[in-house]
Amino acid sequence: MHGDTVRLDLPQPKRISLSESVADSIAEAIATRIISPGERIVETTLVEKLGVSRVPIREALKVLHAQGIISGGGHRGYRVAAFGADVTQQIMEVRLSLESFMLRDAIDNWRQGKGSPADLEPCIEQMRASAKAGSLRNSLIADLEFHRVIRQAAENPIVGTLWDTIARHVLIVFNFERFRDEDLDAIPKQHEEFLAWIKAEVAKPDTAFVQIQTALENHMLLIARTKRQAAVSISR
């Protein structure tokens, strides 16, 4: 994208917790490259395109700045953070740690009849619909929602709150080329396989924590590993 202005197709914010919804909309725009890394965030453009006043825009920008998603501030204005390799690695490490605890607790709750892993199936249906429509944005959101359902099923308020803090980072990282499957049809299939593993574990009396970590890591890093292996094969 050229210049310092935001494109016209920004995702529109929900009208619940407006400043947080605006922050979500900006994060989605960054995740889908409507707003590019290093690009200047123009407050007046956001006001115009999102149809909200300056107050929730400014509150949202403060939240995103505190989370490290945008940098700058003051008279310099804000710009989208670069999200280099080191930062991305840190996000993935924190995500794996938090989601391992979340999945452990969710599986325990499902074993006790508190909800069901079938609650994840609507998210996969959304991934299928997104693939059919060719919507990367909706696919990313459905992917994040899949993991949010696990977060809710875990009923672990401490870990859940920490996960909420990095949810926007995760959404942005989802769309990095090394973690993204260009074939949107492959994404629901990957989650179907992961859900099948979860259901099998729920049917068992116990699951070792290391098994949960390994399964989750394999799910999260499947695309990155596949692409790395393909690159090595090509270079030989």
Image (spheres, rainbow, N blue to C red):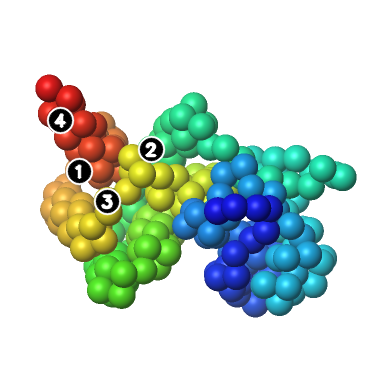
Q: Distance between the residues labelled 4 and 3?
A: 18 Å
39 vs 224, nearest the viewer = 39
166 vs 174, nearest the viewer = 174
Say what amino acid the circle numbered 2 marks. Leu
Circle on res. 96: 2
- Left or right of 190? Residue 33 is right
* Residues at marks 4 and 3 touching, judged by CB atoms closer than 8 Å: no
Say what amino acid the circle numbered 1 marks. Asp
Q: Residues within 10 Å of mark 2 (few under 14, many from 20)?
A: some
Q: How crowded is mark 3: few (under 14 residues within 10 Å), some or many (20 or more)?
A: some
Earlier in the chain: of badge 2 and badge 3, it is 2
Earlier in the chain: of badge 4 and badge 2, it is 2
Earlier in the chain: of badge 4 and badge 1, it is 1
Q: Name the residue under label 3.
A: 181
Q: How far apart are marks 4 and 1 (CA)?
A: 42 Å
Q: Which residue is drawn at 16% across and 54% down?
A: 193
Q: Residue at x 50, y 54 (%)?
A: 33
Earlier in the chain: of badge 1 and badge 3, it is 3
Helix, strand or loop at label 2? It is helix
**Above or below: residue 52 compared with residue 202:** below
* Residues at marks 4 and 2 touching, judged by CB atoms closer than 8 Å: no
How many dots with numbers? 4
* Residues at marks 1 and 2 touching, judged by CB atoms closer than 8 Å: no
Say what amino acid the circle numbered 4 marks. Ile
Say what amino acid the circle numbered 3 marks. Asp
Circle on res. 234: 4
Give the x, y percent position of residue 84: 51, 32
Q: How crowded is mark 1: few (under 14 residues within 10 Å), some or many (20 or more)?
A: few
